[in-house]
Image: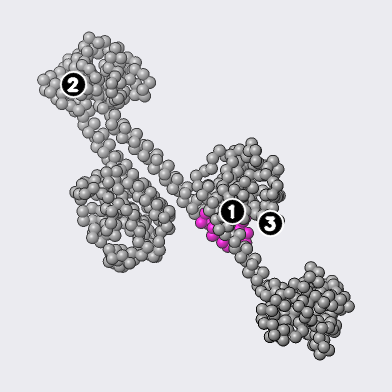
């Protein structure tokens, strides 16, 4: 919370406002404009603004996505809670009684829905205003976006403080110039107005040093005595001044040489201006002073001596150094924010591409290689035998990988089985590195990120490879790897789901056999193959005898068990190339490529003999003839089946 007292807050606000009370020189707004644009980019909003809250006005220093304008404080959304010291986050401003009647919400100025603001708090706790973002669409910002808003608000305060310090320094420089001008005026009149000069010198804020034509000291004023740590010593030769008064070079390299002393330069050259020296007096911190002076001559031109003014710039120098440091830190923070924003955008692009890509693994590998600045990346996943193998890669053309967790030793397997990210700067020197993998991939440094389904089950490893040594991961790479590994886990889950859906679409749910839809596809393929090769092809229709009576007497569960048992037993009598499908109810259909009717009878008899639970079935066979469609062949087989039923069932009848 801000300290009590609106008056103190307004005083702080005046110090941070430009001289004209508004935006100042447009060139000075470039940094604020950049922060505002960055705020819209990081939060995904259409607009942002820096608003300072005066006694009765909202003064807008910078804006993006909306024209700059000042408005009455009572109409300001930012003025509602800026003194709370907390971030305001309104997914829909219409729903908040303190905001819904504001002109920016009700349509008089705009139709803001999403609104969020972070207070601009000075180091003394004074609330100057806010950095706010807004959008016509109602939605919420996530925690990361709200933290970005807080960080950028701190950047705005730093920029305002920098401008305030710049104005103060300019004022100090002007005051210093006035002091120098005053000192020079006093020096010009010193020979004729000694008494007045002494009084003025005693009260001056600059140190005044007066010396004779030989350089011996005649007088110090109070400020000079305080700066130099002692009285003027008239018996001391000019060459001894540096050691006696601690006069050092400005860079701290050591005492000034006699020819570099400001008094010597004034006597020698007639004047010295803005000579920077360092005064080192035992028992206190060194002082930096800027010296200006000139010779003093009588009316007849006779050299009377020289006067040098010393201006203490230690505090100003410290402020300048602090400002330079703050500016450098701000630039570093700005670059870090820009890099982070770039990584976020790259991750967003990669996530969107993964969702629509035919090969999401390749997209993920390319994205992680780009984000890490690496030479190669790959995704390894276990097959049905549990052995890890490459399923996607980039930068590894022609390279294969097979690692068996049951017997192989490898850093890849350490990350996979350990379920934790593993970074190794010097892979060849690591005792658990696989020599074969290191040589095949040309690995110098690498990081492996396990791909975990539902956060715990390892389903692969995402690896990044550098062929030159990398001692530490760049900022954001660890997080980007974890994010993209999550995308890979989602891609694996989607692929598994699609495979299950595809199998479900082609399989009968009760027996697990091909369904009628799958049969239509297989029958068409087998007829096309027989047409092309001239090999025989036979179709068969199989019907469990008296199934309805069995089902009615023993119940539907027993009937289902008979269907499942028959499907398994019949499939056990067939070759891999044969296709058995459920045609409907207790009927099944069978394709026997490469079998003529005679061979098919033998197969059908084996199937009939395998019917479980003491039941029987009847089979009708038809050999395909060139020019016939699958439906025509089945019609012939169905007729044969019908004849078998009429003949007493439990028979194989060939057309």
Q: State the residue lying farthest toward the bottom.
A: 646
Give the residue at mark 2. Answer: 221
Q: Is residue 364 left or right of residue 285?
A: right
Q: Is residue 602 left or right of residue 629?
A: right
Magenta stretch, residue numbers: 347-362
Marker disc for residue 59: none
3 or 2: tag closer to the N-terminus = 2
Give the residue at mark 1. Answer: 451
Q: Marks 3/2: CA distance? A: 91 Å
At 55% across and 55% down in the image, what residue appears?
455
Is residue 356 shown in magenta? Answer: yes
2 or 1: tag closer to the N-terminus = 2
Tally of numbered discs? 3
Give the quadrant of residue 618: bottom right
The residue tagged with tag 1: helix, strand or loop?
strand
The location of residue 390, given as percent across then percent down, is: 67, 52
The residue tagged with tag 3: helix, strand or loop?
loop
At 27% across and 44% down in the image, what residue appears?
124
Give the quadrant of residue 425: top right
Residue 269 in view (yes/no): no
Give the quadrant of residue 236: top left
At 35% across and 59% down in the image, what residue appears?
89
Marker disc for residue 383: 3
Q: Marks 3/1: CA distance? A: 15 Å
């Amino acid at each position: 919370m801000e300290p009590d007292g609106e008056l103190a807050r307004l005083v702080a606000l005046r110090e941070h406002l430009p001289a004209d009370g508004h935006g100042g020189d447009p060139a000075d707004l470039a940094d604020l404009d950049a922060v505002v644009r960055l705020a819209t980019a990081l939060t995904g909003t259409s607009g942002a603004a820096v608003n300072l809250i005066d006694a009765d006005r909202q003064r807008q220093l910078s804006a993006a996505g909306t024209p700059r304008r000042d408005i009455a404080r009572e109409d300001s959304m930012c003025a509602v809670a800026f003194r709370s010291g907390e971030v305001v986050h309104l997914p829909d401003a219409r729903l908040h009684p303190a905001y819904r009647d504001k002109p920016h919400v009700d349509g008089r100025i705009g139709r803001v829905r999403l609104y969020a603001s972070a207070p601009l708090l000075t180091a003394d706790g004074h609330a100057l205003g806010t950095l706010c973002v807004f959008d016509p669409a109602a939605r919420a910002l996530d925690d990361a976006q709200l933290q970005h808003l807080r960080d950028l608000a701190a950047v705005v305060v730093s920029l305002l403080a920098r401008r305030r310090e710049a104005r103060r320094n300019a004022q100090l420089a002007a005051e210093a110039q006035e002091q120098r001008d005053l000192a020079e005026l006093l020096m010009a009149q010193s020979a004729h107005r000694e008494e007045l000069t002494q009084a003025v010198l005693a009260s001056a804020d600059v140190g005044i040093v007066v010396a004779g034509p030989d350089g011996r000291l005649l007088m110090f004023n109070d400020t000079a005595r305080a700066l130099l740590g002692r009285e003027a010593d008239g018996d001391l030769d000019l060459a001894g001044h540096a050691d006696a008064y601690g006069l050092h070079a400005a860079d701290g390299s050591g005492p000034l040489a006699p020819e570099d002393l400001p008094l010597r330069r004034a006597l020698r050259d007639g004047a010295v201006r803005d000579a920077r020296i360092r005064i080192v007096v035992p028992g206190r911190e060194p002082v930096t002073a800027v010296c200006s002076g000139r010779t003093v001559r009588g009316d007849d031109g006779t050299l009377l001596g020289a006067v040098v003014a010393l201006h203490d710039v230690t505090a100003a120098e410290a402020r300048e150094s602090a400002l330079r440091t703050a500016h450098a830190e701000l630039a570093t923070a700005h670059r870090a924010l820009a890099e982070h924003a770039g990584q976020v955008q790259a991750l967003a692009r990669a996530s969107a591409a993964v969702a629509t890509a035919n090969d999401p693994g390749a997209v993920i590998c390319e994205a992680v290689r780009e984000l890490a600045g690496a030479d190669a990346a790959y995704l390894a996943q276990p097959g049905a035998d549990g052995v890890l193998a490459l399923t996607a890669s980039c930068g590894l053309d022609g390279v294969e990988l097979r690692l068996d967790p049951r017997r192989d030793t490898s850093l890849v397997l350490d990350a996979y089985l350990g379920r934790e990210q593993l970074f190794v700067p010097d892979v060849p020197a690591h005792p658990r590195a696989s020599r074969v993998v290191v040589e095949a991939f040309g690995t110098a440094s690498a990081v492996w990120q396990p791909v975990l389904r539902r956060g715990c089950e390892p389903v692969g490893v995402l690896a990044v490879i550098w062929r030159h040594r990398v001692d530490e991961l760049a900022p954001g790479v660890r997080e980007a790897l974890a994010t993209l590994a999550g995308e890979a886990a989602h891609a694996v889950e989607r692929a598994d789901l699609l495979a299950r859906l595809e199998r479900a679409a082609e399989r009968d749910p009760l027996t697990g056999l091909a369904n009628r839809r799958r049969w239509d596809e297989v029958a068409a393929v087998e007829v096309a193959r027989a047409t092309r090769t001239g090999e025989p092809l036979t179709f068969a229709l199989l019907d469990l005898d008296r199934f309805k009576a069995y089902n009615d007497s023993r119940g539907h569960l027993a009937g289902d068990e008979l269907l499942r048992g028959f499907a398994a037993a019949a499939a056990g009598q067939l070759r891999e190339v044969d296709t058995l499908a459920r045609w409907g109810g207790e009927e099944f259909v069978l394709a026997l490529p490469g079998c003529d009717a005679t061979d098919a009878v033998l197969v059908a008899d084996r199937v009939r003999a395998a019917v479980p639970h003491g039941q029987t079935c009847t089979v009708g066979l038809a050999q395909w003839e060139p020019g016939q469609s699958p439906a025509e062949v089945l019609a012939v087989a169905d007729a044969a089946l019908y004849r078998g039923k009429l003949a007493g069932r439990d028979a194989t009848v060939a057309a």
